[in-house]
Amino acid sequence: MNAPFESPEELAAAHIAWVAAQLRDDPLAAIARTLLARVQATRTAGVTLPILVLESRLALSETEMRVLWLLLAHDLDPTVRSAVRAIATEQVADVTLDVIRRVVYGSASRARVWHELGPDAPLRTLGLIERTDGIAPAPEYRQTFKVAPRVLALVYGDLALDPELAAIARIVSSDTPLAALEIDPRVVESARRAVQQQDAIVVAHGRIGSGRRSLLAALVEHPTLVVDAHAISGEREIGCTQLRAFAREARLLDAVPLIRGIDALGDRIGLVEAEMHGLVLATSTTRVARRWTRPCVQIELPRLDGNACGRVWKRAIPQAADSDVEYLASMYPLSPALISAAGRAAKAQCGISKLQPEHIEAGVRTVLDHALAGLATRVNVTQTWDDLVIPEDQFASLIELIARIRDRRRVYEDWGYADKIGRGLGVAALFSGPPGTGKTMAAGLVARELRCEIYQVDVSKITSKWIGETEKNLAALFDAAEAGHAILLFDEADTLFGKRTDVKSSNDRHANQEVNFLLQRIESYTGMCILTTNHESAMDEAFRRRLAVHVRFPMPEVEERKHLWRTLVPASAPTRGELRFHELAERFVMSGGHIRNAALRAAFLAASEDAAITHETLARAARLEYEAIGKIAPAPVKTGSTLYA
């Protein structure tokens, strides 16, 4: 009676014995029939042995499986290794192609051997066997092979995800019902029809956290094997190996492959089409512009409207009142996944105490810090409007900017302006003026007034000498900020948004491409960004049309400088005598930033002398600051018998 194999060890031992008999030229017909019958009995009995799953799910031929068993037996059994050495013509440690051909294929044609063992053969492209001689042009009789660690793991009964992919991929079973996703039913139905096409590539595109992956995973019956395309190596050969291994694991684990951010693969998307069989799912932030060779369905997930956003906030924070939900939807129109994450972080912040607005703000900060890590740094705003000294016209422009954000839901959604405007529903503002006039401070105060987080873009981490990398980093920055409703602050914006030039070299062409990308991304951006510059004339003219507000910050006048001096000397600081701020303001024509430096310098001068701050200390510090910025300090003003130093 041909009993089924009950364990991986028993199956492996039987195959090793079969390989050993084959190498000794023992009569094989009866052994082969018995082995085949027991394998069939194992499958009939419903016993799951990973190495047999490999054969069925990867559709390997009988000879391909015999190649694997020969290499496995050589790896696991010293008797087999000795027998292989006895018939080998070369003194090498691993199994040569000549030995494989004689033992496995016999009199079969060389074409079949090449088809199953060549560089493009499934055994090699799927990473099941590895060539070990390391010399690409070596003659066939010198080429050596060994079985891959992944196959050894299967022989030992391990059907878990390949450890080589564990860092970038994971098996996900959908636990989110469709009813819980705030997605238009028409979009859901389109996606449902798309995933029923067994050989299609289905790409869901939309904001980060909009439910793209959750929608696709909820519509398929099998678990999904998810990989982040951004985590795949940028080195082409390594990246292609990872993609092939990902395709193998999806088939081996009976999972549907799902690639997050498929647009990050660039021209390697062609490998996805060629190597991944059956249904392939993918997500992207924008529509993937490509000439596809397989059926491709691209589905757009639109951003949430105010009511839908409110429902998501209500699920994230059930104890919130309706009025609170309305406020949260208006002030924090995040994507669904970020709202859920912010809600969890807020609850963790408050612990067992009652949830307060500051807990929600902390939760939002947590998810934004994570989303923008490595691209921008959150700015902690400590100043108040009293610290900003600017003319009334500029202050009115800042109020208009705040209104554009605070009331945009009413204007765009309730009043219907979104349908008329189309693209460009975001807000871009330019703050220009001399250094130290309060541009960055004003940006922080606008964010504080709106109770939004503001992130200063780290240009050094955004720009790259490699072609396309700067645009890739900028795309990730805008996508993350848009999903999290964060304000982006581009200080010294002329370094990124500078004028395009005539193309005289490849460097000019790539620089212009970066500016072109920024123009297009600002046009479609739905969030808010503030640009500051000391060189307004260096900005590309095309950006001006895309600006909602342009605020020019002038040098402060005498009264404004006087106010700045007064506010920058804290009431708690030790002072002696009359400080005469009006005289300092008249004598030193400086911006607020330089006045701040001078006031701080005076404090340290006084502290070093263990004395109080006096008018003379302030005048001395102002003179030092004046000279530091390249100006000649004016002579002291003499009034009557008093000399003001």
Image (cartoon, rainbow, N blue to C red):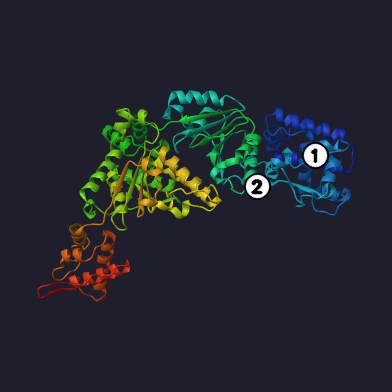
The residue that disc 1 covers is: 114
**Extreme residue in the left direction:** 640
Q: In the rendering, at what x and y percent does residue 525 appear?
A: 41, 39
Residue 346 relative to residue 61: left or right: left
Quadrant of the rendered image containing residue 343: top left
Depth order, front residue of 615/63:
615
Q: Contact, CB < 8 Å: mark 1 with mark 2?
A: no
Which of the two discs, 1 and 2, labels the residue nearer the N terminus?
A: 1
Q: In the rendering, at what x and y percent does residue 393 appear?
A: 22, 47
Residue 450 relative to residue 135: left or right: left
The residue that disc 2 covers is: 237
Q: Is residue 149 depicted above or below 574 in this figure?
A: above
Q: Is residue 54 depicted above or below 538 in this figure?
A: above
Residue 637 relative to residue 30: left or right: left
Residue 336 seen in render: yes
Q: CA distance from mark 1 to mark 2?
A: 22 Å
Depth order, front residue of 389/305:
389
The residue type indicated by label 2 comes to: Glu
Q: Which secondary structure, mark 1?
A: helix
Q: Residue at x 29, y 28 (%)?
A: 415
Q: Which secondary structure, mark 2?
A: helix
The residue type indicated by label 1 comes to: Trp
Q: In the rendering, at what x and y percent does residue 215 appear?
A: 49, 30
